[in-house]
Image: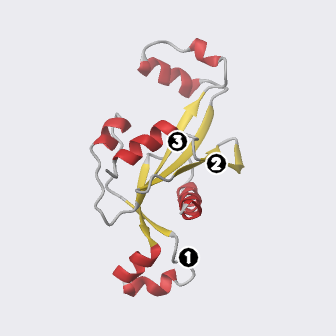
Amino acid sequence: MNDALVAALIEVERHVGRSGWDQPARIFALVPTREFVAAEPSLAAQFAAANPDGFTSIEQDDFHAGDDLGETLARLVWPPSVSGCVLALERAFLPAGSEAELPDDPAQAARVVAEHPDRLDLRVVVGVTRDGTRHAVARLRSDEQELLEGAELVPALADALSHTLE
């Protein structure tokens, strides 16, 4: 089902991207489209063109990442009806070699990165499924035409998401 996960990630990235940059982290449940339509037959017409073997993403509007995303994800648990989940978030990075400029204090380091003229802003969308499939897509703010992707793009974040499905 890797193709279905990749398709869902691209759809979520486009959905989030329509709202522009500088957004908070957003999380989505993934349910098999066939099961979603069976559970919600009144929506079947809206999903007529959807791949029945794909996933439908359902945004969790009440999600707030808080000050520590790792702690927030550690407290998150999905019901058995959810086959996977997707997290979309933005991060700023410095080019290689610029890390030496960073202070040891995390708050000061975050401020330096945010104000650095050479920082790279990145939107990352990571997804995992209960069967262990994982993938991620990413888009640089400076090159919105290119979509990067890979199963091991952000492994620590994929690990944290996988634990929410246990």
Q: Is residue 161 above or below residue 96?
A: below
Q: At 55% across and 50% down in the image, what residue appears?
A: 135
Asked if marks 2 and 3 touch (Cβ < 8 Å), the reply is no
Cα distance between the residues tagged 2 and 1: 21 Å
Cα distance between the residues tagged 2 and 3: 15 Å
- Residue 6 is labelled as none
Residue 29, x across and y down, in percent: 39, 60
Identify the coloring.
secondary structure
Q: At 55% across and 77% down in the image, what residue appears?
A: 50
- Residue 51 is labelled as 1
Which residue type does callout 2 highlight? Glu
Callout in the foreground (2, 3): 2
Q: At 40% across and 47% down in the image, what residue appears?
A: 162
- Residue 90 is labelled as 3
Asked if marks 3 and 1 touch (Cβ < 8 Å), the reply is no
- Residue 149 is labelled as 2
Mark 3 or 1, nearer chain start: 1
